[in-house]
Image (tube, grey):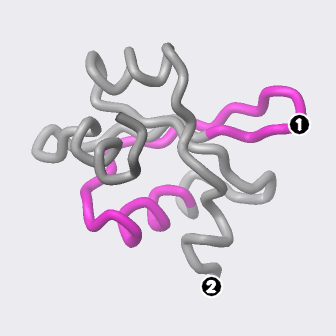
Amino acid sequence: MKSPFEIINYPIATEKSIRLMELENKLIFSIKKDANKSDVKKAIEDLFKVKVVKVNTFIRGCEKRAYVKFHQSTPAIDIATNLGLL
């Protein structure tokens, strides 16, 4: 089993990610190319001790990203603040 640090590279802070954070309770992470949705979900839940509702993955150029939607009881803004994104 992989550790969360072998799956998640770093969080992405762009205008789009801030908008998604505020409107849809989502954060965007850069992830390893070989990681799948269930790996990402487990890694995020283990790292931040939160409930993940849904994970979408997206490959852009040479980078794979994960759009992570959190449960309504966990605001994405709180996680972003702890990560230093805001």
Where residue 39 sits in the image (x, y, percent)? Answer: 57, 63
Query: Which quarter of the figure has residue 62?
Result: top right
Q: Which mark is residue 76?
A: none
Does residue 29 appear to the left or right of 17 in the view shown? Answer: right
Does residue 10 appear to the left or right of 74 in the view shown? Answer: right
Q: Are marks 2 and 1 in contact (CB under 8 Å)?
A: no
Picture layout, residue 25 above or below residue 66: above
Query: Which quarter of the figure has residue 26?
Result: top left
Where residue 30 sits in the image (x, y, percent)? Answer: 65, 44
55 inside magenta stretch:
yes
Residue at screen point 44% across, 40% down: 68
Residue at screen point 51% across, 36% down: 28
Of residues 2 and 37, the one drawn nearer to the viewer in this rendering: 2
Q: Secondary structure at mark 1?
A: loop
Q: Secondary structure at mark 2?
A: loop
Residue at screen point 22% across, 44% down: 78
Picture layout, residue 42 above or below residue 32: below
Residue at screen point 68% across, 32% down: 58
In this figure, which residue is indicated by the disc labeled 2? Answer: 1
Please state which amino acid type lies under the numbered disc 2: Met
Query: Which range is magenta?
Result: 40-65
Q: Which mark is residue 62?
A: 1
Label 2 or label 1, whichever comes before in sequence order:
2
39 inside magenta stretch:
no
Where residue 35 sits in the image (x, y, percent)? Answer: 70, 58
Question: Mark 2, residues whose alpha carbon is within 10 Å: few (<14), some, or many (≥20)?
Answer: few
